[in-house]
Amino acid sequence: MTRRLISTGSPFEAAAGYSRAVVQGDWCFVAGITGYDYATMELPEGIAAQAQNCFDTLTGVLSEAGFGMEHIARVTHLVSDRGHVDALLPVLETNLGQIRPAATMIVED
């Protein structure tokens, strides 16, 4: 069974000793993704832009691994404030609305 490690090149991955994704056989396991733009290492203002960065990173990682967004079966969303949820929902609908994976949203308040 083949095992392949996928990285975004983020220094966080090397420092913490993890891969952004691991392809093991027919499976792809993706680590948690933050709203950083890993090309610039900048975190934009606002949850919508941060969430879109997450999906952009995820799309690239899945593509490199030989998968697509349609292969997503499960997601967990971590939101730091209940007040951000309304701004987040349109980004989730745009990126996951047709896929409709099993999902959990954890909101800190």
Image (tube, rainbow, N blue to C red):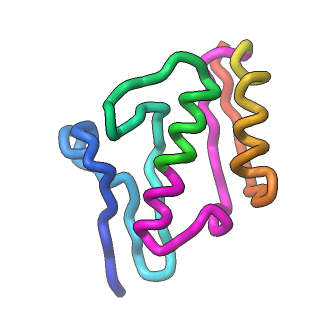
Where residue 7 appears, as percent x and y from the top left, is: 31, 55
> What residue is drawn where x is 59% and y is 18%?
46
Q: Nearer the viewer, residue 98 or 12?
A: 98
> What residue is drawn where x is 44% and y is 50%?
31
Where residue 86 appears, as percent x and y from the top left, is: 79, 22
Span colored in magenta: 58-82
Q: Is residue 63 left or right of residue 97?
A: left
Magenta region includes residue 78: yes
Q: Quadrant of residue 71?
A: bottom right
The single residue placed furthest to the bottom in the displayed view is 1
Where residue 37 appears, as percent x and y from the top left, is: 41, 35
> What residue is drawn where x is 80% and y is 51%?
97
Asked if 30 appears above or below 50 in the picture, the reply is: below
Q: Quadrant of residue 107?
A: top right
Q: Quadrant of residue 2?
A: bottom left
Asked if 39 appears above or below 101 in the picture, the reply is: above
How many tags in the picture?
0
Q: Quadrant of the C terminus?
A: top right
Magenta region includes residue 60: yes
Asked if 32 appears above or below 1 in the picture, the reply is: above
> What residue is drawn where x is 57% and y is 46%?
55
Q: Quadrant of the N terminus?
A: bottom left
Where residue 11 appears, as percent x and y from the top left, is: 22, 39
The single residue placed furthest to the left in the displayed view is 15
Q: Is residue 93 left or right of residue 49?
A: right
